[in-house]
Image (cartoon, grey):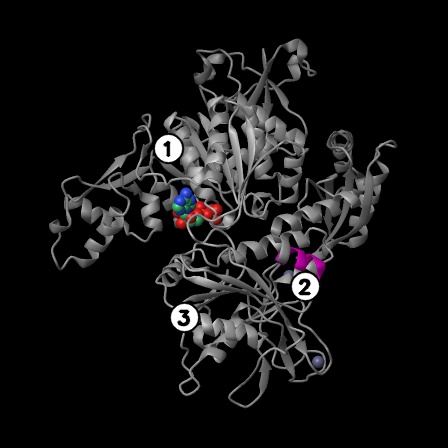
């Protein structure tokens, strides 16, 4: 009697262990004699002690290792499986599909405390307000106590866990004080079955398009059958209402609903949208959780305690007691693809899990990826379109401004020096008009910092990152913003975070004529300040709110910005792609894209698709309230066919055309790709390893082999990257080759001190 154990080691195999002669040494295994499949065991592996998962039982005769060579397991950590059959099947599928070792797949799936062998039922202290306590129980002078009390009050009668409260800024000492005064109490949340989900608010009356989609999703749910849906609805068409009403039926049947959101979309608003409709146990899963919380979330999903689970990418790998529906919101979003270790795509995994659990999976988006459109063409997804906005709101029309016909607006500094604002007078006029009408303007510029390049005007020197193939971005906080967040100026690499002082003279020629070239959000905000300031007082007439990773880095800063915007006063918002997703700014009626169409010129064949998605998402922020909106695109290439197609025909006709192009060129999704990357200390070594890899391909492989070539950013963080692309007409053909070839490649002598990675279905190369 042996067990087969998957261990977190980078080897494509599992390992056989025997039971110790005296099984009473295995306290948890006494009742069953054998550790069950799906439980954790501790074993010796070489000189290490590792924790692994039992994946099979086998007889001595089936092991390739003679019994006297086998080591016994040291310890059983669980009496009952922590991973059920469906999770093990999922892990095996991931290992096969992404050609990744099973033990490593399990290491990705399991929360780190579980991997470390901690017991699953951690006891987490919660705090709640005692039922009879009201605001009147406070003395007028206990202001600080009252303030902390109010923070707890926001969490309702169940209160919240101590970690969450501390994270929100409560102080442990105050929790103690309030407890001593008999105002609040601590408790351990009991893990009984949650009460049935109740509606907290009435659903809206659906329009016909929404109703058709909801009916179809519910029909699949009721028939307990898998069906993948593409809910293709323009921004503001009410996709969320479709999710909510489909969810209602599923939740009322006692099943769990998993909602995936992009990395950036997990704002408190996301939770509020669901919490205001359902009285349910909602669990949020995201990358900012600490280990204890991750484990608790994992347990809540696994035991069925969590009823609505809202999470980013990795939530799709959680175990669920009785999953009934998966929603992937903004399914086209790039953050669903994991870019290291196990390079999975959460939307693909969601579809697999739907199939596994016989449940519907809804991919919702205003800008479907070409992959998903192809799945519709292949009858693998059912498409439901929402082409109108409920009520009177009309989608904002898009209009081009030809920046070749008029030069951009010039402004003068105090010293009389003139500089270019990057905005045409037409654009500035439209912004002014909108502000004067009392509305808000959103200007999209997908580049943070002050300027992308620091240039010497005398000799042409540019400030480059010493570790990457990249320019250093100039970060320079303008006067107006210095107090708000960062207070100094510096050069920074956006790829490896290298930082340096801004030189006062050119290091090559000594000239003082250094110039920040190009425009980032900080510079644009500064230019807008100059344009819209009162000329007498140079005080700005409208707030200019910059929204990017730099201004939202601090805790709660996004919240504060959001509140300021939603006060509704006229303002100019300047934002990077952070503003593109999901946010609802009801007073924005004008969206400006001063140079968003640059991506149509990129060498990456995926760039037009991603550029268009971003442009449409940003444009969708206009006119979401009662007022009509409009979108102005300032461009230097007004005859660009792709741009015209997008503006005139809309995203779908644009995407259909791209898909046709991909078909003609044999590119994904009309072919299937695997990207092999090699990283090392020299370019020669990385390229050689890939050449050796090509030599190992079976002679009849029938794939297109592109490379080895330098990766797009061939030097990054002082390491060199080369890559190799395999393209196949047929998915099975690709996987057939990979399954024979990829493991031997990793043991190539030339790859010894290099890092080799495989990306199946890469989203960029
Ligand atoms: P999407 O997610 O498709 O961009 P939302 O779900 O945010 O759009 O919906 C946009 C707005 O329309 C929301 O304010 C929502 O409450 C409203 N809405 C959605 N469906 C309906 C409906 N059937 N009747 C009235 N208002 C609706
Ligand atoms: Zn110089
Ligand atoms: Zn760098």
Q: Mark 3 falls on what kind of element?
A: loop
**Is residue 735 left or right of 635 when viewed as pictured?**
right
Q: Mark 2 falls on what kind of element?
A: loop
Residue 42 in sight here:
no
Residue linked to disc 2: 470
Q: CA distance from mark 3 to mark 1?
A: 56 Å
Q: For ligand 2, which image quadrant applies?
A: bottom right
Residue linked to disc 1: 122
Residue linked to disc 3: 437
Q: Residue 413: where, in percent of width, then height?
A: 53, 86
Judge whether 343 appears above or below 709 on screen.
above
Q: Is mark 2 within 8 Å of ligand 3?
A: yes
Q: Is residue 451 magenta?
A: no
Q: Is mark 1 within 8 Å of ligand 1?
A: no
Ranked by sequence position, the earlier of labels 3 and 1 is 1
Q: Mark 1 falls on what kind of element?
A: loop
At label 1, counting other C-alpha atoms closer than 10 Å, the crowd grade (few under 14, some 14-19, many 20 or more) is few
Q: Is residue 640 magenta?
A: yes
- Which residues, given as a range, are shown in magenta? 639-647
Q: CA distance from mark 3 to mark 2?
A: 43 Å
Residue 683 appears in which quarter of the rendering? bottom right
Front tag of 1 and 2 = 2
Viewer-nearest residue: 67 or 723: 723
Judge whether 193 appears above or below 22 on screen.
below
């Amino acid at each position: 009697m042996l067990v087969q154990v998957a261990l977190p080691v980078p080897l494509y195999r599992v390992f056989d262990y025997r039971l110790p002669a005296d099984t009473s040494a295995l306290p948890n295994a006494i009742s069953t004699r054998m550790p069950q499949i799906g439980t954790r065991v501790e074993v010796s592996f070489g000189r290490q002690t590792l924790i692994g998962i039992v994946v099979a039982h086998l007889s001595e005769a089936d092991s390739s290792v003679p019994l006297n060579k086998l080591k016994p397991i040291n310890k059983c950590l669980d009496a009952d499986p922590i991973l059920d059959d469906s999770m093990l099947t999922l892990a095996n599928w991931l290992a096969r599909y992404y050609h990744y070792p099973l033990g490593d797949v399990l290491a990705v799936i399991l929360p780190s405390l579980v991997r470390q062998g901690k017991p699953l039922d951690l006891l987490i202290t919660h705090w709640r307000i005692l039922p009879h306590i009201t605001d009147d129980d406070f003395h007028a002078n206990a202001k600080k106590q009252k303030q902390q009390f109010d923070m707890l009050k926001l969490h309702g009668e169940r209160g919240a866990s101590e970690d969450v409260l501390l994270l929100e800024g409560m102080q442990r000492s105050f929790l103690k004080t309030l407890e001593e005064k008999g105002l609040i109490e601590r408790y351990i949340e009991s893990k009984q079955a949650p009460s049935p989900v109740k509606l907290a608010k009435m659903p809206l009356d659906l329009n016909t398009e929404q109703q058709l989609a909801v009916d179809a999703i519910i029909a699949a749910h009721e028939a307990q059958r898998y069906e993948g849906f593409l809910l293709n609805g323009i921004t503001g068409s009410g996709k969320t209402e479709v999710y909510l009403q489909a969810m209602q039926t599923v939740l009322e049947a006692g099943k769990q609903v998993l909602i995936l959101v992009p990395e950036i979309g997990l704002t408190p608003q996301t939770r509020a949208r669901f919490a205001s409709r359902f009285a349910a146990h909602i669990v949020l899963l995201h990358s900012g959780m600490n280990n204890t919380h991750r484990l608790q979330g994992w347990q809540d999903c696994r035991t069925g305690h969590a009823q609505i689970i809202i999470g980013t990418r990795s939530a799709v790998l959680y175990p669920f007691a009785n999953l009934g529906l998966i929603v992937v919101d903004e399914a086209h979003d790039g953050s669903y693809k994991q870019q290291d270790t196990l390079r999975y795509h959460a939307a693909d995994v969601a579809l697999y899990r739907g199939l596994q659990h016989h449940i519907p999976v809804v991919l919702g988006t205003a800008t479907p990826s070409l992959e998903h459109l192809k799945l519709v063409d292949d009858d693998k997804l059912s498409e439901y379109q929402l082409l109108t906005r409920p009520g009177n709101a009309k989608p904002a029309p898009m209009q081009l401004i030809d920046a070749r016909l008029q030069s951009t607006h010039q402004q003068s500094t105090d010293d009389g020096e003139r500089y270019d604002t990057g905005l045409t007078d037409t654009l500035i006029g439209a912004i002014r008009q909108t502000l004067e009408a009392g509305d808000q303007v959103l200007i999209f510029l997908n580049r943070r910092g002050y300027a992308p390049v620091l240039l010497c005007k005398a000799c042409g020197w540019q400030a480059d990152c010493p570790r990457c193939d990249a320019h250093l971005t100039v970060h320079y906080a303008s006067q107006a913003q210095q107090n708000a967040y960062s207070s100094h100026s510096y050069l920074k690499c956006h790829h490896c975070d290298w930082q340096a002082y801004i030189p006062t003279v050119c290091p090559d020629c000594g000239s003082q004529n250094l110039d920040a070239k190009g425009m980032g959000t900080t510079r644009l905000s500064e230019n807008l300040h100059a344009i819209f300031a009162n000329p007498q007082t140079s005080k700005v007439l409208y707030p200019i709110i910059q929204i990017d990773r730099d201004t939202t880095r601090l805790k709660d800063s996004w919240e504060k910005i959001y509140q300021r915007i939603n006060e509704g006063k006229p303002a100019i918002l300047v934002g990077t792609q952070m503003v593109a997703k999901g946010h609802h700014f009801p007073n924005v009626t004008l969206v400006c894209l001063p140079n968003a169409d640059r991506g149509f010129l990129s060498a990456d064949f995926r760039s037009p698709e991603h550029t268009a998605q971003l442009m449409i998402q940003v444009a969708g922020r206009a006119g979401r309230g009662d007022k009509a909106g409009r979108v102005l695109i300032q461009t230097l290439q007004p005859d660009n066919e792709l741009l015209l197609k997008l503006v005139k025909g809309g995203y779908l006709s644009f995407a259909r055309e791209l898909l046709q192009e991909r078909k003609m060129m044999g590119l994904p999704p009309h072919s299937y790709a695997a990207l092999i990357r090699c990283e090392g200390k020299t370019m020669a070594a990385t390229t050689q390893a890939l050449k050796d890899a090509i030599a190992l391909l079976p002679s009849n492989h029938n794939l297109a082999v592109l490379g080895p070539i330098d990766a797009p950013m061939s030097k990054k963080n002082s390491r060199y990257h080369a890559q190799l692309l395999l393209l196949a007409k047929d998915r099975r053909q690709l996987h057939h080759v990979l399954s024979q070839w990829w493991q031997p490649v990793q043991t190539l002598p030339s790859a010894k001190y290099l890092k080799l990675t495989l990306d199946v279905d890469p989203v960029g190369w």
